[in-house]
Image: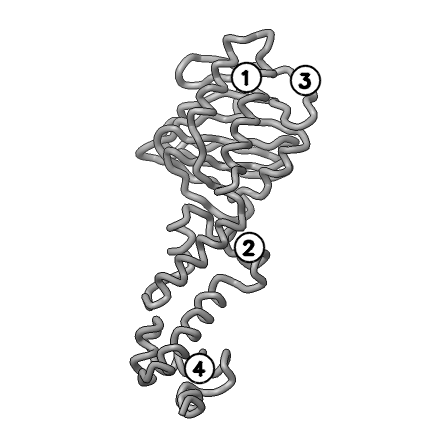
Amino acid sequence: MGKKFDNGLNYKYIPVRNQHFLDLNPRQVGHKQCSMGEMDFQYGEVFTLIHYVSKGSGVLYKNHFSYKVKAGEAFIILPGEKASYQADKNDPWFYHWVAFDGKLSESFSSLPPVFSAPGDIFIKMEKSEEMPIMREYYLAARLFELYAALFSTEKLPNNHVRAAKKLISGRYGNSDLKISDIAEELSLDRKYLSTLFKKETGQTLQECLIITRIESAKELFEMGYGVAQAAESSGYKDISTFNRMFKKHVGMSPGQYKKTLK
């Protein structure tokens, strides 16, 4: 995070005493306007660290993956994780950060590496600079506010799964639909969404898409559609791929399945 000093608008570090609060315990807070292409590093801190990007953009690198981050989004680095993050070379980011620990900080590990976040909470955290006596209590209150915003009912992981299923059921007929499209639509990291979906449903997103398409084809066969028509309407451009996937999941070819309906 750099040197611990305050040089006004470009870099600000607000000293925080460790009060050892049980649930959410603030450890650091500040902001930074990065220069073009500037790189920062984390080498495995003992606390949870969140950066909120209020202007510009950049890239987070961690766990052998890269994640683009734009204004209005936040990125998280968990305890023990090594990461680097680089400001865009044309539109360098201005970010606010907060570091914390405590029992409830473990919940933040369920978040994707990059996520939408309420920026006003991070901005309010910096008002703690005016509160030398009650600073840590004020910051703890803002952390609880952030916790409530990120883990409210509508943002629970199983709702991400329901949203993904809804997108698949509405777009499976588009042969160009990709899993990455679904993740982008939900503003979620693809790896995070795939892991979450597998954990919640027992199947991968790709498997869900294929099964949805096969079930659609079966319904179309029952309505009298031909193989080519059913394949195209269910999201398959290539008949041979459709035949192969249908037989794999149904146990018989589309033609054989149609005969059972007579």
Q: Secondary structure at mark 3?
A: loop
Q: Which residue is mark 4?
A: 244
Q: Report x, y in % for residue 142.
A: 53, 23
In this rendering, which labeled residue sits more in front, label 4 or label 1?
A: 4
Task: Name the amino acid, label 3.
Answer: Gln
Q: Report x, y in % for residue 61.
A: 49, 42
Residue located 41% across and 46% down the image: 187
Task: Name the amino acid, label 1.
Answer: Lys
- Is 236 situated left or right of 79 in this image? left
Distance from Cα at disc 4 to Cα at disc 1: 61 Å
Q: Which residue is mark 3?
A: 19
- In this rendering, the answer to whether 213 lies above or below 130 is below
Task: Name the amino acid, label 2.
Answer: Thr
- Is 191 situated left or right of 185 in this image? right
Residue located 59% across and 10% down the image: 134
In the rendering, which numbered label is found on residue 195? 2
Q: Are marks 1 and 3 in contact (CB under 8 Å)?
A: no
- In this rendering, the answer to whether 15 lies above or below 246 is above
Q: Which residue is mark 1?
A: 4
Distance from Cα at disc 3 to Cα at disc 2: 36 Å
